């Protein structure tokens, strides 16, 4: 019997547990094993637990199960649906690229318009930024850009 | 429960050439040999016959649609146990309903209501966690060695030894408390 005290509780095993398990499955413990089991708490526990579990397993053996043909058919349908989804995904890819390109184009145009309208020179820009109307326009433009970028990122997923 | 499957879509019939029929026959053979064991395992781990029938089908659908290597009988069964286990745990994780499920499990047993000793053993099993049920079932019904259980459950061999010992001890304690001694089995 082996002991291992490095866990929450000691793990106890007996070298004849598999023999005990086989005896339960066969329903015929030999006299040597019987003598051992009488003295071995681990094997007694294995035999008790196995006997009950194998008992309900035997009762389960009569359960009515779906027919193989039905499962096969479902697998074919699933396979075909997955193939169709993959095809649709591939077909939608150019549209997604086009949408991303359009979003980038809009963003660049908007940025250019903002730049030419609101910031004609670097020096004037600082002056203009102090103007609430210019600052508001710039902030709105940046927000629009951020929204477009976020939308593009979400759709790309 | 054993209803005939609906007629297969037309494309499937076109597709089922000689190799399709071979594959179908091979699957039927695998299914007939393994499904009672997988069904019993799923039923005992989920604790619900309703859920387990859906999950049984899902297990074989995933098996059929997976790119799987050549396997012998023992490896195929182990592979199926692994798919079954993953589906149970994935289902619990994604639906976040383990507690609901475990609470609902006894009342969900609409199929022949278990009586007497069988019901008592089912109640005892229900007091274990899903992983503990998997462990004891694979070890004491399927007779799996620690390394095979580790493969099915995706844990280390060494952990199986400890976890199985604790699960067995817990179940033995519950059975003992309920007065379920092996002598009652006759």
Image (cartoon, coloured by chain):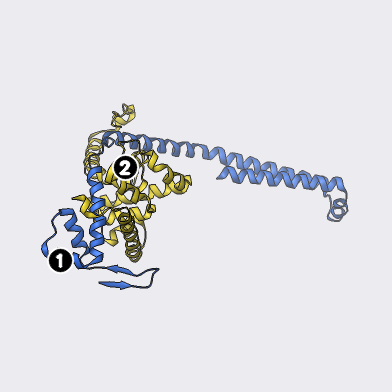
Chain colours: A blue, B yellow
In the picture shown, does residue A68 fall above or below A29? above
Helix, strand or loop at label 1? It is: helix
As drawn, the label of residue A35 is: 1
Q: Is residue B29 left or right of residue B166?
A: left
Front residue (pair B5, A16): A16
In the picture shown, does residue B160 fall above or below B16? below
The residue depicted at 30 percent of the width and 29 percent of the height is B5
As drawn, the label of residue A137 is: none
The residue depicted at 26 percent of the width and 50 percent of the height is B77
Residue B150 percent across, percent down from the top left: 33, 59
Are there few (<14), some (14-19), or many (20+) residues within 10 Å of tag 2?
A: many
The residue depicted at 26 percent of the width and 51 percent of the height is A53
Q: Give the farthest residue toward the left.
A: A31
Q: In this view, does B31 lie to the left or right of A122?
A: left
Residue A39 in sight in this render:
yes
Residue B70 in sight in this render:
no
Helix, strand or loop at label 2? It is: helix
* Number of marks in the rendered image: 2
Q: Name the residue under label 2.
A: B60
Q: Is residue B27 left or right of residue A153?
A: left
């Amino acid at each position: 019997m082996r002991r291992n005290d490095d866990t929450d509780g000691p793990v106890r095993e007996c070298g004849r547990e598999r023999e005990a398990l086989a005896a339960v499955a066969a329903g015929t413990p030999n006299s040597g094993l019987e003598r051992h089991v009488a003295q071995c708490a681990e094997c007694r526990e294995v035999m008790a637990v196995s006997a009950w579990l194998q008992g309900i397993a035997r009762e389960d053996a009569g359960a009515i199960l779906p027919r193989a043909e039905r499962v096969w058919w479902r697998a074919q349908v699933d396979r075909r649906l997955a193939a169709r989804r993959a095809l649709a995904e591939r077909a939608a890819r150019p549209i997604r690229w086009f949408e991303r390109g359009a979003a980038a184009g809009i963003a660049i145009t908007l940025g250019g318009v903002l730049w030419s309208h609101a910031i004609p020179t670097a020096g004037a820009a600082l002056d203009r930024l102090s103007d609430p109307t210019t600052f508001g326009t710039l902030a709105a433009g940046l927000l629009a850009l951020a929204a477009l970028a976020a939308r593009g990122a979400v759709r790309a997923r | 429960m054993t209803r005939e499957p609906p007629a297969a879509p037309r494309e499937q019939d076109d597709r089922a050439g000689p190799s399709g029929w071979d594959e179908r026959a091979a699957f039927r053979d695998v299914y007939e040999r393994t499904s009672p064991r997988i069904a019993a395992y799923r039923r005992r781990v989920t604790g619900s016959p309703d859920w387990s029938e859906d999950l049984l089908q899902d297990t074989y659908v995933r098996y059929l649609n997976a790119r799987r290597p050549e396997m012998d009988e023992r490896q195929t069964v182990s592979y199926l146990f692994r798919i079954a286990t993953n589906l149970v745990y994935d289902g619990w994780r994604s639906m976040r309903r383990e507690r609901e499920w475990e609470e609902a499990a006894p009342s969900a047993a609409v199929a022949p209501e278990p009586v007497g000793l069988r019901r008592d053993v089912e109640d005892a099993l229900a007091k274990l966690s899903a992983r503990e049920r998997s462990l004891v079932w694979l070890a004491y019904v399927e007779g799996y060695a620690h390394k095979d259980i580790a493969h099915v459950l995706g844990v280390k061999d060494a952990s199986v030894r400890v976890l199985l010992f604790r699960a067995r001890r817990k179940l033995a304690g519950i059975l003992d408390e309920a007065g379920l001694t092996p002598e009652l089995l006759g």
